[in-house]
Image: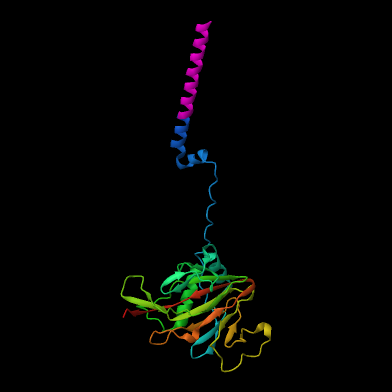
């Protein structure tokens, strides 16, 4: 009986060893066949969800011959109000192109890009090769006429900016106190010779663009308060109401390349809703002194 019992125990041990060996072999085969996916069988913690895909405008978008209207607000410095500068279709596609790219806005401080509490909005770099973005950049370039040297200057990188409730951008200039070194390694620097600020979404309360040092010679044409495009601000200057499709253009630099301090402006707080706009900063290059 003892011999039979010992033999049976040995058989059981052998079967157990075989079972373990088979299990190990199966596991190794799973690793080889599944590759990285086999880790899902080992680690129980869930993987992070995939990042949403960036929506860009359709490649078959055709640039429309947009008939915008302009009104000179100030000659010195030059400030121009532009009505119907961008179409509804372009707005929709540009917003889609930047919707998933937003991050906290930064400011240029002594050549470094940093976050600062006086700018609390969201910003998104726009792809210049997006068809809708390209349409607006080409229209802006045409608007500039002969300001840019075609062999030296460029339109720069367009930017989407968004303000939600409580967000603002305190008084600032678009031109840089220290011109930026050229990114191509050449001995040149550039500055923002002018600015386009075009409103894309205006479902907000507040959010005016305020130029405290800009004044008009004559009053705005007769309109009721709801349809007024700008107003005289209580602290001086003009405050422009955000209107989708409309924009403001101004020249930042004097002919010698120095910044015009009179172009100081602010994005007043949005007290409700949402405002989205597009910044375009044409770059003017100069030899590095």
Where residue 201 sits: x, y (%)?
Answer: 60, 72
Q: Residue furthest bottom?
A: 217
Is residue 130 positioned above or below 2 on the image? below
- The overriding secondary structure of the stretch rendered in magenta is helix
| Picture residue at 49% right of the left edge, 73% below the top | 135
Q: Which residues are magenta?
A: 1-24
Q: Nearer the viewer, residue 68 or 162?
A: 162
Is residue 115 positioned above or below 248 on the image? above
Where residue 139 sits: x, y (%)?
Answer: 48, 77
Asked if one can make out residue 56 in the rendered structure from this viewpoint, the answer is no
| Picture residue at 52% right of the left edge, 70% below the top | 160
Is residue 165 positioned above or below 7 on the image? below
Q: Residue furthest top?
A: 1
| Picture residue at 45% right of the left edge, 33% below the top | 29
Is residue 240 positioned above or below 271 on the image? below
| Picture residue at 51% right of the left edge, 71% below the top | 116
Is residue 148 rendered to the left or right of residue 244?
left
Residue 20 magenta-highlighted? yes
Where residue 168 sits: x, y (%)?
Answer: 57, 74
Asked if one can make out residue 193 in the rendered structure from this viewpoint, the answer is yes
Where residue 89 sits: x, y (%)?
Answer: 57, 70
Residue 162 magenta-highlighted? no
Q: How is the image coloured?
A: rainbow
């Amino acid at each position: 009986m003892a011999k039979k019992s010992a033999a049976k125990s040995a058989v059981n041990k052998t079967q157990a060893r075989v079972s373990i060996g088979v299990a190990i072999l199966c596991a190794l085969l799973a690793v080889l066949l599944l590759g990285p996916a086999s880790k899902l069988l080992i680690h129980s913690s869930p993987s992070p969800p995939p990042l949403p895909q960036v929506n860009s405008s359709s490649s078959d978008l055709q640039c429309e011959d947009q008939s915008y209207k302009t009104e000179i607000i100030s000659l010195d410095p030059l400030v121009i109000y532009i009505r119907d500068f961008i179409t509804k279709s372009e707005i929709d596609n540009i917003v889609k192109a930047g919707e998933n790219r937003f991050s906290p806005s930064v400011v240029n401080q002594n050549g470094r890009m940093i976050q600062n509490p006086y700018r609390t909005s969201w910003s998104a770099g726009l792809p210049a090769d997006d068809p809708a973005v390209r349409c607006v950049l080409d229209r802006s370039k045409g608007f500039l006429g002969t300001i840019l040297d075609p062999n030296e200057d460029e339109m720069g990188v367009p930017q989407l900016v968004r303000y939600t409730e409580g967000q603002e951008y305190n008084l600032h200039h678009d031109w840089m106190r220290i011109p930026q070194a050229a990114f191509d390694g050449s001995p040149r620097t550039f500055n923002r010779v002018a600015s386009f600020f075009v409103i894309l979404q205006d479902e907000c309360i507040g959010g005016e663009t305020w130029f405290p040092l800009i004044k008009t010679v004559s009053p705005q044409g007769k309109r009721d308060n709801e349809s007024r495009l700008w107003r005289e601000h209580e602290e001086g200057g003009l405050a422009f109401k955000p209107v989708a499709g409309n924009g403001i253009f101004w020249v930042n630099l004097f002919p010698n390349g120095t910044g015009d301090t009179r172009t100081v402006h602010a994005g007043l707080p949005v007290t409700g809703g949402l405002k989205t706009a597009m910044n375009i900063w044409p770059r003017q290059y100069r030899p590095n002194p």
